[in-house]
């Protein structure tokens, strides 16, 4: 039972965010000891010093003990996660939590005043609800404890499911699959992750408290690395991202020990780790996503999806055009770049580029390889800091702002390699980009559930509209991995549209799309113009530029050589020479 | 402050630090080339110890032969882990997380296997002479100079560790093999362009790394005992040495190990010895916080 | 029927990165001693084609025949041993190693130490700028010198055909011309074939015997070097 809860909590982290924590066990322990210390009766003068096994505490009632445990473990987790979250590489969190687990184990043994050293603490009072017996010594009491635990476990499962299916969960999944995209749609990847780790820890701590209160006695040896590994195994075996799977995994692995004992006698316990280890290895080879991969849900619990009214493409375009008109800038030049420079080491990628992008038109950046086109995109979006020069959006300077701020001011960019979350539906992929979602802050989900749900409905409608504009609304409920490449590119553009941006920077929208689908992409991009968006794209195939662009900017060696209509540029002999060499 | 205490602690720091350096280089080799979190490196370490103990006890091998046997076992197991465990996944382009889980599974199952085969207790190295009687494997006198003491085996550990570290550094920097490793590590695209087979390079790296782990395991076994869970603790120290010392530099990993040993030993001036692991983990935490690429590493993040 | 002179024949090549379909159905062949150039816009699939032929990139369908043998899907080490060299466009050498070490690595599949030494001497002769700096780090060379080193590395296996991916990348126009002259000189001197992928059409066309144009993963044109040299409407093709 305990295992189920611990497993579910880790699943939050592993399944949704995609990172492994080895420290669940110690956090469990921290919770347990905190609760113990809070709940134990205070020292009275007639109790002798250091009577082994019996400890002293603050004599708080059991619910304070549990609450205290939850708070303490939450804070501890936030502290540990600070270094790991800044660095995207997952292995750091593993190492960090491993170190915390082992360091924590040793600290527990050493910190006698809190934990009673290796001998632990005993005499912890049990939960008191009215007259119900919760002590571990009677059969009735044990049963009651089990029921209590079951209720707690169910509670945790419900919370976990709720988080997973909420807008907050959606952001987590996006962080897991495409971390780089999150800031480009104007949202922060750091806070949700740390929060999740904190929650995962808090759950472990809370359960630790319940454990302590029901066992009556705990020792540091309860909370060792083996347990952490067991928890990881449970989640992996059962299926990351799937709560039901974790439950199965916990039941299977949890009952392993008593079965072994029954079959092989006490010595059979040794086989336990061998089986865990082998199971882990086998699963990684055969079914890396666990028994029950993410999509599988219990029928009664899956939500019905299509409350959204179907929309034709032209209706969608009209709707979005209207809202666009309200927020549109009035000046002719929406985006201005002035004398931008950027060098990497000794190489000057952009050497004083200046040009502007007119409102409502599609402008293409052309130039030979290494001309600096992608670098310019990156400077506009804030991914790179320009060495010198300025970028103005609607007359206001945005040079040097962070990626997230720039995205929020109305510039969105697509990526050459699409970067959609394959395991999510098209609709969800687009929905995550809609700004100002109440449901993305966990707090709102709790204190303003109604408003959050209403907003979510709006968000989904909006996402649907964006998909409709690009002509792919019929694919809204399909998993992105099932879509053709051309459709994926369109969904990615829809995602940009959803950010309410004014300027879309498209990085090679037609590359890699097979001939039969390419027309669809071209049409989609042109629809953007119909809505009134301003588009700047990088394209290499002149063939496509002719079809798509109103204007072109020719770049070479980091400098703008010419601006004008595509025809003019192509008939210019000097440019021709430059592009084709000579 | 008692200078003699400091000196003594410094000496133990050096001694343990050289073992850490060995472990650091062992992990650095694997991590730098393949980015694999080779927790299962614990296995060759334990395997060497148990191999030696078993061959001495059951086969009555003389001491040197049983040590060699232990080494052979560790290299073999290390190679097997690569061939059967990691390579198939790499061919399938599995994620680093999957590789880690396999490593985890192996490192969890193995100690238990050892317990099943050899029993739960610690096993000392027992060597039998040609007359079938129990001999002392090594004379291990304690040398004393003033208040400072050091055992012979500690000296052996110092020398062996550093010699091996230097040999590995030599191989990497001066030989054709080392060139291939550096090529694969710094420019995998070009490495395949000149025809370097990454599987062969991995095999060599893993064998080398397992050899080093095996030596570490033997050093521990001969000075103390063989213990089913011995692998994991030392493995972790190896990792910490790499991340602390420098994830892009083998020399950095070695030095990292040394500094780690010194720091954890010298902390004994103020704290009890049971705090040493805590010191080590705190150092790791601070490193990851402040300088994630390690003391001597180049910032790649 | 493959002509007697033909040493490389690739047809029906399809390739993709996941869903991103890069090559739709491409064919190209090279005869002994011939310089064939493939040009096209960025992302047209030129590099993928070379990598598919050499074996670095998996083909989803198609066949590659080299020196009469079917080599589709072979490993790069096998291709190098058979006499095909490949020089990538980006970072075609090992920056952190010395010039000498780079050449030695170029000869990775060559067994005979004496032969390696001979070839190193020859490369130094062909590229005098490398001769005096055997111990310098390759990363310190200029762009043009690095290109020369990469060509030298390819020569170490005495290839029958060199695959060159955008050799003009990262070097200034004057040096580009010189580099291409060297390539042509090598081809003539050693009787080698060369398959060049280039975006710099002008330079490539000057030395090519045959020119192909790739656009969006499909081959849209193939003509002789002379015809290509007199062409003026390149914009329409790209």
Image: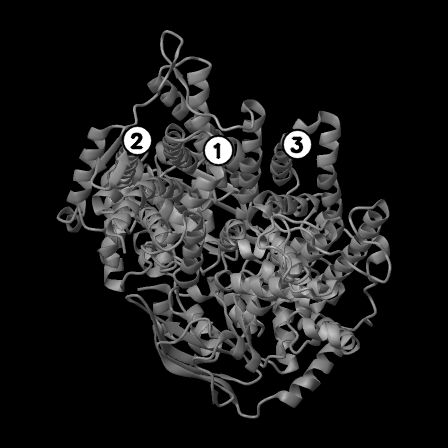
Chain letter of the residue carrying label 2: B
Dot 1 or dot 2, earlier in sequence? 1
Side of C18 relative to A451 (left or right): left
Position of residue B41 measured from the top left corner of the image (x, y, whole percent): 46, 37
Residue A580 against residue C93 in the figure, above or below: below
According to the picture, the residue beneath numbered tag 2 turns out to be B153
Q: Return the mark for residue A269.
A: 3
Q: Is residue A576 or residue A345 the one in the foreground?
A: A345
Kindly tell me whether residue A476 is visible in this rendering. no
Q: Residue at x 55, y 68 (%)?
A: A190
Q: Residue at x 43, y 33 (%)?
A: B45
Provide residue B83's location: percent of width, then percent of height.
49, 31
- Separation of marks 3 and 2 at Cα, in angstroms: 37 Å
* Residue sitting nearer the eye, B266 or B213: B266
Badge 1 element: helix
Crowding at dot 3, Cα within 10 Å, few <14 / some 14-19 / many 20+, comes out as some
Q: Are marks 1 and 2 on the same chain?
A: yes
Mark in the foreground, 1 or 2: 2
Give the CA distance from mark 1 to mark 3: 21 Å
Q: Is residue A269 placed above or below C175 in the rendered structure?
A: above
> Which residue in the protein does label 1 denote?
B43
Residue B34 in the image: above or below residue A158 = above
Q: Where does the image place residue B150, in percent across and percent down from the top left?
A: 27, 36
> Which circle, 1 or 3, is nearer the viewer?
3
Question: Alpha-carbon neighbours of circle 2 within 10 Å: few (<14), some, or many (≥20)?
Answer: some
**Quarter occupied by residue A194:** bottom right
Res A151 quadrant in image: bottom right
């Amino acid at each position: 039972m305990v295992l189920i809860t611990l497993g579910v909590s880790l699943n939050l982290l592993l399944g949704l965010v995609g990172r492994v924590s080895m420290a669940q066990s110690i956090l469990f322990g921290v919770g347990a000891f905190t609760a113990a210390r809070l709940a134990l009766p205070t020292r009275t003068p007639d109790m002798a010093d250091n009577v082994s096994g019996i400890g002293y505490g603050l004599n708080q009632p059991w619910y304070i003990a549990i609450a205290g445990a939850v708070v303490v473990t939450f804070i501890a987790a936030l502290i540990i996660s600070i270094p790991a979250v800044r660095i995207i590489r997952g292995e750091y969190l593993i190492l960090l939590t491993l170190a915390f687990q082992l360091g924590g184990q040793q600290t527990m043994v050493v910190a006698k005043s809190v934990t009673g050293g290796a001998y632990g603490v005993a005499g912890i009072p049990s939960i008191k609800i009215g007259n119900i017996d919760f002590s571990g010594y009677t059969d009735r009491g044990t049963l009651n404890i089990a029921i209590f635990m079951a209720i707690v476990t169910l509670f945790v499962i419900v919370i976990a499911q709720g988080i997973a299916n909420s807008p907050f969960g959606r952001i987590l999944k996006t962080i897991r699959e495409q971390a780089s995209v999150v800031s480009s749609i104007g949202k922060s990847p750091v806070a949700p992750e740390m929060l999740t780790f904190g929650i995962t820890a808090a759950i472990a701590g809370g359960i630790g408290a319940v454990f302590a209160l029901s066992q009556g006695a705990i020792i540091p040896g309860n909370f060792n690395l083996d347990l952490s590994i067991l928890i990881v195994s449970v989640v992996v075996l059962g299926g990351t991202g799937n709560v039901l799977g974790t439950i199965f995994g916990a039941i299977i692995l949890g009952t392993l020990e008593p079965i072994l004992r029954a079959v092989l006698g006490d010595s059979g316990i040794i086989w336990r780790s061998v089986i865990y280890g082998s199971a882990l290895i086998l699963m990684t080879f055969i079914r890396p996503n666990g028994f029950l991969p993410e999509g599988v849900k219990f029928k009664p619990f899956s939500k019905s999806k299509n409350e959204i009214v179907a929309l034709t493409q032209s209706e969608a375009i009209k709707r979005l055009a209207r809202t666009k008109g309200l927020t549109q800038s009035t000046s002719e030049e929406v985006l201005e770049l002035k004398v931008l420079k950027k060098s990497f080491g000794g190489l000057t990628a952009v050497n004083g580029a200046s040009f502007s992008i007119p409102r409502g038109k599609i402008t293409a950046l052309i130039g030979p390889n290494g001309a600096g086109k992608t670098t310019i995109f990156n400077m506009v979006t804030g991914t790179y800091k320009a060495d010198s020069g300025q970028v103005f959006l609607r007359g206001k300077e945005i040079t040097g702002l962070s990626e997230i701020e720039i995205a929020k001011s109305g510039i969105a960019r697509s990526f050459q390699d699409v970067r959609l979350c394959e395991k999510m539906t098209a609709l969800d992929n687009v929905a995550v980009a809609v700004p100002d979602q109440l449901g993305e802050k966990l707090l709102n989900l709790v204190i303003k559930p109604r408003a959050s749900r209403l907003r979510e409905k709006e968000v989904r409608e909006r996402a649907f509209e964006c998909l409709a504009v690009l002509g792919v609304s019929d694919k809204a409920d399909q998993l992105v991995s099932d879509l053709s490449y051309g459709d994926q590119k369109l969904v990615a553009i829809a995602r940009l549209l959803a950010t309410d941006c004014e300027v879309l920077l498209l990085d090679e929208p037609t590359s890699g799309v097979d001939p039969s689908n390419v027309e669809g992409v071209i049409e989609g991009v042109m629809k953007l113009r119909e809505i009134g968006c301003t588009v700047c794209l990088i394209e290499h195939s002149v063939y496509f530029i002719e079809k798509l662009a109103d204007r072109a900017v020719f770049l070479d060696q980091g400098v703008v050589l010419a601006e004008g209509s595509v025809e003019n540029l192509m008939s210019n002999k000097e440019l021709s020479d430059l592009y084709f060499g000579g | 402050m008692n200078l003699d205490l400091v000196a003594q602690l410094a000496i133990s720091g050096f001694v343990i630090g050289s073992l850490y350096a060995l472990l650091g280089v062992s992990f650095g080799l694997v991590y730098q080339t393949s980015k694999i979190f080779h927790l299962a490196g614990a296995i060759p370490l334990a395997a060497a110890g148990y191999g030696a103990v078993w061959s001495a006890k059951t086969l009555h091998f003389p001491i040197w032969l049983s040590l060699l046997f232990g080494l052979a076992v560790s290299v073999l197991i290390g190679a097997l882990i690569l061939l059967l465990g990691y390579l198939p996944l790499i061919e399938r382009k599995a994620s680093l997380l999957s590789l880690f889980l396999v490593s985890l599974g192996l490192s969890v199952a193995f100690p238990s296997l050892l317990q099943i085969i050899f029993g739960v207790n610690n096993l000392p190295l027992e060597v039998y002479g040609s007359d079938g009687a129990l001999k002392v494997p090594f004379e291990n006198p304690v040398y004393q100079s003033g208040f400072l003491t050091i055992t012979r085996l500690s000296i052996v550990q110092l020398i062996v560790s550093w010699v091996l570290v230097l040999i590995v550094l030599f191989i990497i920097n001066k030989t054709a093999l080392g060139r291939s490793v550096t090529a694969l590590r710094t420019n995998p695209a070009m490495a395949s362009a000149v025809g370097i087979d990454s599987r062969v390079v991995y095999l060599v790296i893993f064998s080398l790394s397992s050899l080093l782990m095996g030596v570490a395991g033997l050093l521990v076994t001969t000075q103390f005992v063989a213990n089913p869970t011995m692998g994991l603790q030392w493995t972790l120290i190896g990792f910490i040495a790499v991340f602390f010392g420098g994830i892009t530099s083998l020399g950095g990993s070695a030095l990292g190990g040394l500094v780690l040993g010194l720091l954890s030993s010298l902390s004994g001036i103020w704290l009890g010895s049971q705090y040493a692991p805590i010191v080590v983990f705190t150092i790791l935490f601070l490193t990851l916080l402040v300088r994630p690429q390690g003391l001597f590493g180049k910032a790649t993040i | 029927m493959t002509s007697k002179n033909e040493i490389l024949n690739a047809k029906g090549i399809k390739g993709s990165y996941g869903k991103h379909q890069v090559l739709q159905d491409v064919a190209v062949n090279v005869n002994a001693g011939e310089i064939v150039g493939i040009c096209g816009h960025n992302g047209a699939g030129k590099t993928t084609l070379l990598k598919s032929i050499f074996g670095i990139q998996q083909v989803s369908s198609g066949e590659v025949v080299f020196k009469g043998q079917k080599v589709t899907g072979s490993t790069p080490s096998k291709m190098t041993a058979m006499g095909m060299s490949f020089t990538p466009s980006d970072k075609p050498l090992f920056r952190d190693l010395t010039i000498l070490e780079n050449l030695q690595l170029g000869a990775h599949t060559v067994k005979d130490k004496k032969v390696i030494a001979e070839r190193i001497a020859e490369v130094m002769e062909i590229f005098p700028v490398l001769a005096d700096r055997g111990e310098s780090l390759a990363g310190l060379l200029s762009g043009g010198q690095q290109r020369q080193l990469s060509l030298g590395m390819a020569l170490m296996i005495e290839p029958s055909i060199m695959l060159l991916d955008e050799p003009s990348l990262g070097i200034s126009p004057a040096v580009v011309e010189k580099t291409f002259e060297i390539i042509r000189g090598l081809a003539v001197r050693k009787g080698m074939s060369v398959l060049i992928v280039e975006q710099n059409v002008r330079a490539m066309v000057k030395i090519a015997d045959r020119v192909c144009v790739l656009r969006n993963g499909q081959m849209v044109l193939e003509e002789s070097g002379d015809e290509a040299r007199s062409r003026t409407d390149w914009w329409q093709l790209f």
